Amino acid sequence: MRSLLLALLLGAAACSAATLIQAETPETPDQQHGPEEPQEIAYVSFDASDKLKVTVLETDDPEEAEKDIPADYVAKAVYRNLINQTGWAYLELQTNAAVDDERQARAAGALEGYLSAGILHMHVNNVARPFCDGRQALCARIQKFLERNLGWVGSMVKKQAGKDVYWHQVKLFYVQQDALLEGYNLKRAQDLSLPELTQNDILWLNVQGDLEDLVSALASSEDGLDNEATVMERGRVLGSGSCSALIKLLPGSKDLFVSHDTWSSYETMLRVQKKYVLNYQMGPGRARSELLPGRAMSFSSYPGVLTSGDDFYIMSTGLVSLETTIGNGNASLWQYVKPVGQVAEGTRSMVANRLATSGRMWTQLFSKYNSGTYNNQWMVVDYTRLVPQSEGQSKSGLLYVLEQLPGFIKAEDLTSVLLSQGYWASYNVPYFKDVFSMGGNEPLVRKFGDWFTFEHSPRAEIFRRDQGKVSDLQGMWRLMRSNDFKNDPLSVCNCTPTHNGENAIAARSDLNPADGKYPWGALGHRNHGATDTKITSKELAASLRFLGESGPPHYSESCPVFSWSTADFAATTPHQGLPDAWKFPPVVHPWAWGLNHF
């Protein structure tokens, strides 16, 4: 069977999403990186003393497993680590609606921690623990901030979770997060080769997005940061992008593609595609039959992380939420980042995903308790509002856009923009003029020019030029994986050399020469680039599926396959459990349980 990758590259005839449902595995020798790990199916039960037990079944067939899972199970899951074959591990987790919500949350977290233990500790060592190297004093302040915030959240949960839908979901999020370590320790008791982890390791994994802004908000001259640097530089490399996104409406509204490229450092590439079906009730005191509207969702994620982090979610309500980071360059706004009265960004996004039934409702829920950290441009697509033009495409509700800064959030229905342009692109620059100005972007434009503008940044120009070529899923994939910076005139910068790997839809900053000359940090040589691509359509989203490709782009003469063995930063960058060469096919993973959700 010819791989999907070859079909795409050879320009095979357009195929419907239905033909992409079956997952493809690499067949050529250069795509094989080691033996496949077996699929595991397990469930959680509690004994009379409330002790949690994980049972791993002998079969690896989900249909056969259903016969062996007792009716009173609390959570069940299918897990398979195919990082060496596809660049992804896969976790499908479901809880029992007949069980009380808190037990469901605890069982869900424990089962995930147990099954993914083998890569969870590696991700901690690659990402969480190295974060504080060389900045211990700053991290001590961040730790104190996080502890105070958790204390306040805990007090609100105690007061409100028994009567308020929002705080009930916040409580369940933290119950699930705490239980990750419980499950990991159950596995560690069976496998003494696993290292010890702490609850703090789990916490720091789950606030990775917030940490970048907490560095800026809490930094002082004592931390050894360059006092001459701009505030934007202190928290992150100046101009550094974190993701590209494109929402493409096909002519006649016959389909809508939603896509996202994560941009990150390469040690983060232990990836997990997840599907959660958490059958929580709508709120405390509600009937058990009144379940969450967004109880089922799929998303790209990481070991031990309960959110996407990228972010890219598909919900059973027909909503898709995704974001690219806009950051904050206005030092005066950091005063609004406080440990009391605010909820971490990832928790807020997950609560909105679970409770919202429309884009407007999602933005309202997310706007509560703004943390001012992980400041992003969020896009919320509502597939239930997508109607063929011949049947009267809705003029509202299809696309909401929200932008967050410390102390300020703005959201609008931008369906009209999507309909008039035929697309919406997102590339780390605020769209709303007041957010752009308030976030400190105007001084960057005055100093450096159009690169920092919404209208004329390189990716704005590339999306504008190339989005019209997209007519099917293959075309969308080609655009979102594109980077031919050595030949693309829109990749030019005032640099030496003149063409830059950052100036593309899927970045490859590692390919910029280390001895080059660059006007600001983002354009330099560094461990950074596009680490994946995800694309969904109306048909795929209905079954919570997406086309996903893991690793940096490698399809043009400008971009060779990324390999740790040839990377000049490999010796100083932890990368436990990561394959050497990142040449994997795009895949659509076939979830085992449940078909269409909307």
Image (cartoon, rainbow, N blue to C red):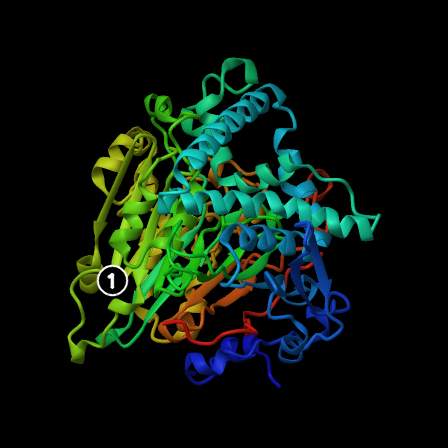
Q: Position of residue 575 (x, y in %)?
A: 70, 47
Q: Quadrant location of the N terminus?
A: bottom right
User: Regarding mark 1 in the picture, which secondary structure is present there?
Assistant: loop
> Is residue 257 or residue 294 the one in the foreground?
294
The kind of residue on which mark 1 rests is: Leu
Residue at 36% from the left image edge and 47% from the top image edge: 165
Residue at 68% from the left image edge and 75% from the top image edge: 68
Kindly give the residue lying farthest to the right in the view shown: 192
Circle 1 packing at 10 Å, graded few (<14), some (14-19), many (20+), is: many
- The reply to whether residue 551 is visible in this rendering is yes
Residue at 45% from the left image edge and 82% from the top image edge: 18
> Is residue 485 or residue 355 the one in the foreground?
355
> Is residue 256 or residue 400 the one in the foreground?
400
Snapshot quadrant of residue 290: bottom left
Q: Quadrant location of the C terminus?
A: bottom left
Q: Position of residue 472 (x, y in %)?
A: 37, 76
Kindly give the residue lying farthest to the top in the view shown: 222
Q: Position of residue 168 (x, y in %)?
A: 42, 45
Kindly give the residue lying farthest to the front in the view shown: 48
155 above or below 516?
above
Snapshot quadrant of residue 147: top right
User: Which residue was labeled with disc 1?
Assistant: 398
